Image (cartoon, rainbow, N blue to C red):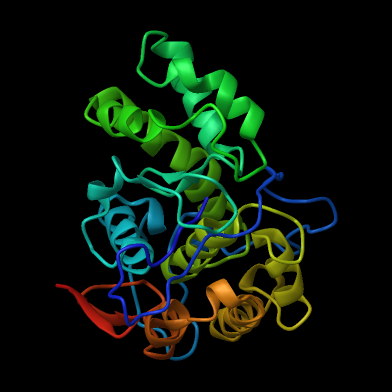
Amino acid sequence: MKRAGLLLLAVVPVIVTTAAYVAAPEQPAGSGAGRPASASRAAGGESSAKGGRAAPRRAGLAAPDKKELAQQIVASAENSTLDWRGAYAYVEDIGDGQGYTAGVIGFCTGTHDLLTLVEEYTRDHPDNGLARYLPALRRVDGTDSHEGLDPGFPAAWRQEATVPAFRAAQDTERDRVYFDPAVRRAQRDGLGTLGQFVYYDAMVMHGPGTGAYGFYGLRERALRKALPPSRGGDETAYLEAFLDVRRAAMRSRSAHRDTTRIDTAQRVFLREGNLGLDTPLVWKVYGETYRVP
């Protein structure tokens, strides 16, 4: 689950993946959303919080153009590129203790999500080139071991990534585990498109865990500092609190000390009042400037 900074220049600190992921419920017990969101938010509309840009109702981050934009912004932090589709064939052990990191969202052999992806794909395509590695993937799950995977697994992954069905399977698993739960939770918290992206990016890096470093753990700490719109709070103030909590968590780990994906990207959008994540966008990650017209 989450690589970061894989293709950075040598002078830039490499951001590596997070602790092992255990799939968590979309909304852990005891974290109810309180008062319901307004009708416009429930319909996916944008907030009109003070300082925010007025925006018409829309499908939020799940709208095709916004979802594409979300993948581009994440890819700028994860792979130092806007070409997120170039990562389907990616596979490498980046030395973060999670084994091989691979694919469009950084599935890992040590964090269960890569195993789940290959199992699901094999149910529909039993003769695929990765199926023979399933016994080894089950043995190494939760560790950084390559036992039974070397030397052929990386080449087999790259070859399978040329198959459209496998690329589609990666998209499906990304959406099931990371994108869809993040967007739904954000909508229930009354957040507009930017807030939905803030949740998605955190889910990608930290995983859907309830521990101190997992997405749901971060959200619980943010709720102690500010209320989301669904509970009568100010959207901008809540997102500032969430980003503060996330930034502190990242700074607590040497592998994630570079927080530019927050400082010179998400925080910039927020302080510009761009709650709708409207283009054009200009941001920086690791000192590199990115633009989407």
Q: How many marks?
A: 0
Give whichever of 43, 116 is nearer the camera.
116
Q: Residue at x 23, y 48 (%)?
A: 86
* Viewport quadrant of the C terminus: bottom left
Residue 121 at x, y percent in the picture: 44, 21
Residue 262 % position (x, y): 47, 80
Q: Given the current orientation, which residue lies at the most extreme left position?
A: 293
Occupied quadrant, residue 137 = top right
| Nearer the observer, 183 or 118 | 118
**Residue 241 vertical position relative to residue 75 in the rendered view, above or below:** below
Residue 4 lies in quadrant? bottom left
Residue nearest the viewer, comparing 215 with 64: 215
Q: Residue furthest right?
A: 30
Tell me where residue 112 appears, x and y as whole percent: 61, 38
Position of 248 with respect to 66 (left or right) is right
Q: Residue at x 53, y 26 (%)?
A: 148
- Which residue is depicted at the point 24% across and 26% down? 164
Furthest residue toward top: 127
Q: Along the horizontal axis of the image, is 254 left or right of 266?
A: right
Q: Is residue 41 above or below residue 166?
A: below
Q: Position of residue 33 (x, y in %)?
A: 73, 60
